[in-house]
Image (cartoon, grey):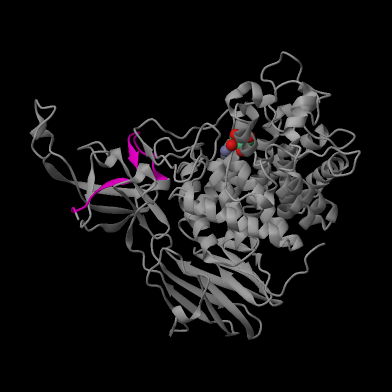
Amino acid sequence: MIREKSPSRLDPVAFNDVHFTDTFWAPRIKLVHEQTIPFEYQQCKETGRIDALRLDWKPGQEPEPHIFWESDVAKWLEAASYSLAVHPDPDLDGLVDQVVALLAGAQQPDGYLNVYFTVVEPGRRWTDLRDAHELYCAGHLIEAGVAHFQATGKRQLLNVVRRYADYIATVFGREPDKKQGYGGHEEIELALVKLYRVTGDEKYLRLSQYFVDERGRQPYYFEQEAQERGTPGFFGTIFPERDQEQAKSREYNQSHLPVREQTEAVGHAVRAMYLYCAMADLAREVGDESLAQACERLWQHLTTKRMYLTGGIGSSLSNEGFTSDYDLPNEAAYAETCAAVGLVFWAHRMLHLECDGRYADVLERTLYNGVLSGISLDGKKFFYVNPLASSGNAHRYEWFGCACCPPNIARLLASLGQYVYSQGPSDLVVHLYASGQAQLQVGGQALTIQQSTQYPWDGAVRLAIEQLAEPSAFTVKLRIPGWCREPAVRMNGMEVDVAANLEKGYVAIERTWQASDVIELDLPMDIQRMYAHPAVAADRSCTALQRGPIVYCLEGVDHASASLGELELPLSQPLQATFHPDLLDGVVALHGMALVPNQAAWDGLLYTTSLPQMQETPLTAIPYYAWDNREPGEMRVWIREQRPSL
Ligand code: FUB
Ligand code: ZN
């Protein structure tokens, strides 16, 4: 059953209807177009990912196509497509067409499209759903096909992926002649919802529902599959330790329980995020309350027990994922860039199940911190893991053997516009603040909204309604970020009572709007000291600095006089925020004094009975996302805090 559009249903305003003109996002989106996308194409080409699509690999030839190479190409295509819609570019358009033609050429007569199982292990299709990533790659190809069509109007790739999805629908399902399996790495589930939305064909929605509903049912598919195959899965040989404990191996791909019974975010973090995205999508499309409730429980668990201050998630290398509650080590943090990207995707979907600022707060936190740290300021180096402390040897790289993160961050930034506004029959909602213009439809009326702000460095925001043909009654909802303590709002110069009009984190202004109406927001950005739950052992006796949506860190390059672990920030120490146009492409840095041990007092001593003498040293904190863009060295988000004894 497909859910009727409810009168209060909100839809995101499409990324290409939102035009950034700010000094924070607009240059980054341009950088993705001019540097990141060409650079990532070159990497895909040099590593063999593009030419593998010609299907001319022969046994013994190096490099051998990898099981999920086409997912990198697909995410690149998605990023390139979005970028073309915002920055028309005939050369890139031509390159995209060439890759699309290669994919079309690689499609088999029955619609199947997977390089590895066509040339490396033909005849073994769908025999290793747990590890072999066939459905994962299919999902990324589908997302690329949808994006290419939406961004360019061209149908070639959409037709290819539709034919592939039609074929997959003949292979999987509850019917006795079909495989009752699902993918070990979720992704196809959310992609099929996108395919349904763009084609209107309910078959894709039903297939997505099937994959989500089947996961975790007993008997466990992956265990049956392994028995039938009689050999370890692709990763069974590479990472045997993942499968030593059966419960952990089920949790790894969230197949330990039917999804509606899941209450904790477990296993591989990217897999979890993509599954939860699909659950939220289905909850919305078919009105499935039980899925919405499961999402809400998982959200609560993740965001109150297993998320870093930066929005990074999945603290452990061993499963690229979750461990136990409050286990959030800093230097050993995994916090894969893809997992943070996935959290932004999920938060956005939760926001469209229920317009609640809790979701937008996490979306914003993750975007400005855990996602953005994934890419260097020149757009050509990437973190795969995003630690919150480093002794100096964590650095971004140009590419990875497993290169999921670089094109994932590119596709998110290239389509960033979609996260700013939502529109509905009677609502216009502003989630994020950034200068620019957007074209919206509220209650059948077209209008333009113009934002002016220096966000994220300053919380003054001016929103002007423009080009509204005739006065129209609707509600404008403005997000009051969770970090903001004393917001103020003015409507055409008149103070609005924020507390009286606050609905789940948004101040709602209901009136008959007309062109030239102006709303002003003041979101004072105090420097805030953040503290972690006492169970987070890694952050005990420490504080982290945050200003507005930006989480700060210390870097060794700014603190020559001591190691960052020795540095203590007195509780009463005032800090100042200063904008530096020439630092790290323009950032607000935080400055104050900290204490470090007086090294001279330790000359010739290893131990002493006297209390260590401390001396003052200047402290500079920079935005976490910008670290490792200068000299290599130490970094720390959580700083030891000197507190008077109680
Ligand atoms: O398995 C495909 C991708 O590679 C995952 O999403 C990442 O965590 C990395 O393992
Ligand atoms: Zn990744």
Residue 486, by quadrant, is bottom left
Residue 184 x %, y %: 69, 36
The part of the image, by quadrant, that contains residue 54 is top right
| Left/right of residue 88 with respect to residue 122 in the rendered view | left
* The N terminus - image quarter: bottom right
Residue 56 is situated, as x and y percent measured from the top left of the image, at 78, 22
The span picked out in magenta is 626-645
Seen from the viewer's position, the closer of residues 393 and 463 is 393
Depth check: give the residue in front, 178 or 453. Answer: 178
Q: Which residue lies furthest to the top in this view?
A: 60
Q: Is residue 617 visible?
A: yes
Residue 283, image x, y percentages: 71, 59
Decide: is 566 above or below 51. below
Can residue 89 be seen in this snapshot?
no
* Up-down relation of residue 268 to residue 448 (above or below): above
The image position of residue 285, as x and y in percent, is 74, 61
Towards the viewer: 37 or 459: 459
